[in-house]
């Protein structure tokens, strides 16, 4: 209701200002002459509720002076300024002519109007007048007739971004940010928890800044909204080739004490709890939250392979895996906003996350000859455990200048984390008759890592008139990482031999950036021009072997273009609520730690994974044409896009060589194992379309269908081997929401339903394709108690237990059809309760004298 009041206040205020502007055009010259004849001063104060003494947000404050009319015979009131009060009720007017008397008109929805005449002594220069607290009374007659309830839609679409309000996502209740992503148009999530935006890896931000947290480590109940930007401008980090997904955490700013508590249980091994508190009093807004999330699951996988020589099948290999795993996360977040005055705010926040993973897996292996006769079999048992600690600290300072819209913000973000892991592997081999084929392979490994990131950023926004705006900023990002991994082969006597796959790894990444954008409007066209310059270095080292690797961009003046990232956005308004946009950006994607680290992952003995320290960054030129139409029952967003990526980082697979197998001997791997790594392709071109519709079919019944179609061509030649491939892919997602509102039945009243269905077609790879995948999630929510403060949600993830990730590789040396799944169908029952008290005070004493000083402001 308060949100609706705010909207109505703003609309009425703008309407009044526009009307008054046209009515007083003839008096502008007089007003200017008045200003030229008098000294200038400043008047400020605070609008408060007379009953609670709390500040009133979005109250219309207008200032008038008396002036002679056109005939000069009598005086009329002339509007010389106006504004909406800030969230704490503050208002101020600067550069005012110091005449004897001003008249203030204050109005707000739900309150009686207030008129105040103020006398100013203009005998000296630089006068400031503090009006103190201006108390307005609630209008009981008006409030009794208002029954409007403000509700934000689940999806808000604009010409350049989508905003997804998480509270509308029933299926994610009690889950993690991964569960939230499953319900967002344009976003897909594979079984490993990797998120893709239009088949590209996006950059993940938390509250607009880089993070070392994964999406799985962020509780869904702590998220307010998700912002999607598919083609970011020069203002944003250039390393966002796949777009940006910004996770905005909850931070309530309602007056008094407010909070939400939630509990959830489910299967397999699902348990979660969350408590969020917010206290807004005086110049402080304090927020805190704590959560615990536990999830279990059974992981399954299958590999069917044909090993070939010169295209002829020589033998077969089959492997089936099943495992149990448990994940636990604990997080604590707290901080405060300090409203120093009308123009300056300091925000400090701190976040701690702790996690623990355990897993057990059993693999059954079959080795078949060319006639598909069993030659031998193997049994592999493994168990592992890993844990991590993460912390995030952020300090933000915001200063608003006297010119409307002009703002300076500076922030420092520091991320720090540690982790450790260990695993034990036992592989035994037998002939078909059960006799031993060879001695068992036993491998023990353990590792640890440490990571810290520092981001310093300063942004400045300066409007240049009504339609133009200049923005600039600087940013420095420093990322340090080191890891220590040791693997040992254990023989029958218990003696340990260190394996060659052990490694120590460390790197330092530094990115310094400067950007500037300029936007303006001409008739029905608006445009934004931007340029970002980034200098980046990556220095990696393997201390055990003294091997060093990395890159620097640009590494010389002649490669200066490698550091420049322009952006162009041109938008035309076709009609109210209907516009089109064409845009272009140039971005970079730098290889991350896991793609660079030469460590070989042997968790799957036939599908090994290894990074490539020789990878180079890829560069993408991205073009979009957007059409956005808003209408009474919803909105439509259509996008045509084209991407050209030079040096595309893509996956490459091949069987290990005899030398590699010898190096990994006694590591419990298969001699025909496939080594999956990464390469720089020559280029990748993508042409596609994305259509998203948000439509209300009936009251409380809406659908959000999305379809994306894309044609992709990969040009890749490695060691004279042509891996080029091309093909068409598409994805479709449907989100359906329905809520029952009836007075006939308390049971069915305020009962909501949500279904999220998704299908992804096969997708080309340089040496094969990804297999199609599909899933359906469902949830029911019942709101109850007074003002629907409580809710009970029952959700089912992957209703038909179909979601799995599969690939097919077809090369001269092997053909492999495989799939894996990390999660199975899960059920969750969650209860949440919202509470609050707007007149709550931490210190129960009369604070009238203190409240009178809240309106003080300093420039």
Image: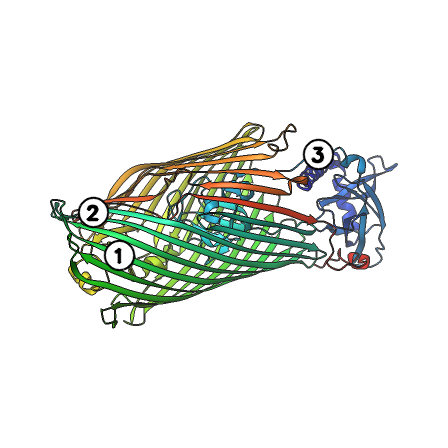
Foreground: disc 2 or disc 3: 2
Can you tell which of label 1 and label 2 is closer to the viewer? 1
Residue contact between numbered discs 2 and 3, judged by CB atoms under 8 Å: no
| 352 to 228, vertically: above or below | below
Report the Cα–Cα distance between label 2 and label 3. 65 Å
Of the pair 154 and 353, the residue shown nearer to us:
353
- In the structure shown, which secondary structural element does the residue marked by tag 2 occupy? strand
Query: Where's residue 717, x and y in %?
Result: 22, 49
* First in residue order: circle 2 vs circle 3: 3
User: On the rendered image, what quadrant is the N terminus found in?
Assistant: top right
Q: Quadrant of the C terminus?
A: bottom right
- First-in-chain label (3 vs 1): 3
Q: Which residue is mark 2?
A: 305
- Asked which secondary structure carries label 3, the reply is loop
**Can residue 399 be seen?**
yes
Residue linked to disc 1: 380
**Residue 616: quadrant of the picture:** bottom left
Q: Which numbered circle lies on residue 388?
A: none
**Badge 2: few (under 14), some or many (20 or more) residues near its Cα, within 10 Å?**
many
Residue 585 rendering spot, x and y as whole percentages: 42, 46
Judged from the image, the secondary structure of the residue bearing numbered disc 1 is strand
Residue 693 can be seen, yes or no: no
Residue underneath mark 3: 147
Q: Which one is nearer the viewer's eye here, 549 or 414?
A: 414
Q: Is residue 37 left or right of residue 528?
A: right
């Amino acid at each position: 209701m308060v949100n609706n009041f705010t909207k109505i206040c703003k609309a009425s205020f703008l309407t009044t200002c526009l009307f008054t502007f046209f009515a007083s055009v003839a008096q502008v010259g007089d007003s200017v002459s008045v200003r030229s004849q008098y000294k200038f001063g400043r008047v400020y104060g605070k609008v408060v509720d007379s009953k609670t003494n709390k500040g009133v947000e979005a109250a219309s404050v207008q200032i008038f002076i008396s002036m002679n009319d056109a005939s000069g015979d009598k005086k009329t009131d002339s509007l010389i300024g106006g504004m909406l009060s800030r969230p704490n009720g503050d208002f101020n007017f600067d550069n005012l002519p110091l005449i004897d008397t001003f008249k203030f008109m204050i109005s707000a929805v739900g309150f009686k109007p207030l008129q105040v005449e103020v006398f100013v002594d203009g005998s000296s220069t630089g006068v400031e007048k503090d009006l103190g607290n201006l108390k307005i009374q609630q209008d009981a007659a008006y409030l009794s007739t208002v029954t409007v309830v403000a509700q934000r839609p689940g999806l808000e679409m604009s010409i350049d971004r989508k905003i997804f309000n998480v509270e509308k996502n029933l299926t994610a209740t009690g889950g993690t940010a991964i569960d939230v992503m499953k319900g967002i148009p344009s976003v897909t999530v594979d079984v490993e928890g990797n998120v893709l935006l239009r088949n590209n890896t996006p950059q993940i931000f938390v509250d607009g800044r880089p993070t070392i947290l994964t999406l799985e480590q962020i509780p869904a109940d702590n998220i307010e909204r998700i912002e999607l930007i598919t083609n970011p401008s020069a203002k944003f980090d250039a390393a966002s080739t796949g777009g940006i997904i910004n996770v905005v955490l909850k931070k309530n700013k309602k007056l008094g004490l407010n909070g939400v508590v939630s509990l959830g249980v489910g299967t397999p091994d699902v348990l979660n709890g969350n408590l969020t508190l917010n206290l807004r009093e005086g110049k402080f807004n304090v927020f805190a939250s704590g959560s615990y999330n536990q999830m279990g699951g059974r992981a399954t996988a299958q590999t069917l392979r044909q090993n070939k020589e010169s295209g002829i099948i020589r033998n077969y290999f089959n492997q089936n895996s099943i495992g149990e795993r448990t994940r636990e996360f604990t997080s604590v977040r707290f901080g405060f906003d300090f409203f120093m005055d009308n123009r300056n705010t300091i925000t400090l926040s701190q976040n701690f996350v702790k996690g623990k993973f355990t897993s057990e897996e059993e693999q059954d292996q079959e080795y078949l000859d060319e006639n598909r006769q069993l030659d031998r079999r193997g049994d592999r048992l493994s168990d592992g455990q890993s844990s991590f600690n993460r912390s995030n600290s952020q300090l933000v300072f915001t200063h608003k200048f006297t010119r409307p819209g002009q703002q300076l913000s500076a922030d420092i973000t520091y991320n720090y984390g540690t982790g450790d892991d260990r695993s034990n592997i036992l592989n035994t081999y037998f002939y078909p008759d059960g006799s031993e084929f060879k001695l068992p392979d036993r491998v023990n490994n353990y590792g640890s890592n440490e990571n810290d990131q520092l981001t310093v950023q300063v942004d400045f926004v300066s409007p240049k008139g009504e339609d133009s705006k200049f923005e600039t900023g600087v940013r420095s990002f420093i990322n340090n990482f080191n890891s220590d991994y040791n693997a040992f082969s254990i023989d029958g006597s218990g003696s340990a031999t260190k394996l060659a796959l052990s490694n120590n790894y460390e790197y330092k990444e530094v990115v310094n950036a400067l950007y500037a954008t300029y936007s303006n409007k001409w008739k029905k066209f608006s445009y934004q021009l931007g340029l970002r310059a980034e200098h980046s270095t990556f220095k990696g080292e393997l201390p055990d072997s003294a091997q060093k690797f990395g890159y620097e961009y640009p590494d010389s003046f002649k490669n200066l273009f490698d550091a420049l990232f322009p952006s162009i956005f041109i938008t035309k308004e076709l009609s109210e609520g209907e516009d089109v946009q064409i845009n272009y950006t140039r971005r970079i994607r730098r290889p991350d730690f896991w793609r660079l680290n030469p460590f070989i992952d042997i968790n799957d003995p036939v599908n090994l994974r290894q990074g490539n320290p020789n990878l180079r960054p890829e560069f993408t030129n991205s073009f979009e044409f957007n059409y956005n139409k808003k209408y009474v029952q919803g909105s439509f967003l259509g996008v045509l896009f084209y991407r050209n990526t030079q040096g595309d980082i893509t996956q490459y697979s091949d069987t290990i060589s005899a030398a590699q197998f010898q190096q990994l001997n006694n590591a419990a791997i298969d001699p025909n194992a496939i080594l999956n790594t990464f390469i720089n392709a020559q280029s990748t071109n993508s042409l596609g379309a994305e259509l998203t519709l948000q439509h209300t079919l009936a009251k409380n019944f809406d659908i959000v269908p999305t379809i994306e179609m894309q044609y992709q061509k990969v040009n890749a030649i490695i060691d004279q081997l042509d891996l080029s491939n091309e093909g068409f892919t598409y994805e479709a997602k449907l989100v359906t929401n329905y809520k029952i509102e009836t007075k006939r039945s308390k049971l069915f009243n305020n009962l909501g339903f949500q279904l999220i269905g998704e299908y992804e077609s096969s997708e080309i790879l340089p040496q094969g394709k990804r297999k199609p995948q599909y899933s359906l999630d469902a949830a029911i929510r019942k709101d109850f108690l007074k003002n629907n403060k409580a809710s009970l949600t029952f959700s089912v993830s992957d209703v038909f237990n179909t979601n799995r990730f599969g690939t097919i590789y077809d090369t001269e040396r092997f053909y492999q059809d495989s799939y894996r799944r990390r999660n199975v169908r899960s059920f969750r029952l969650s209860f949440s309760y919202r509470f609050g008290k707007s007149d709550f005070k931490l210190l129960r004493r009369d604070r009238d004298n203190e409240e009178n000083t809240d309106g003080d402001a300093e420039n």
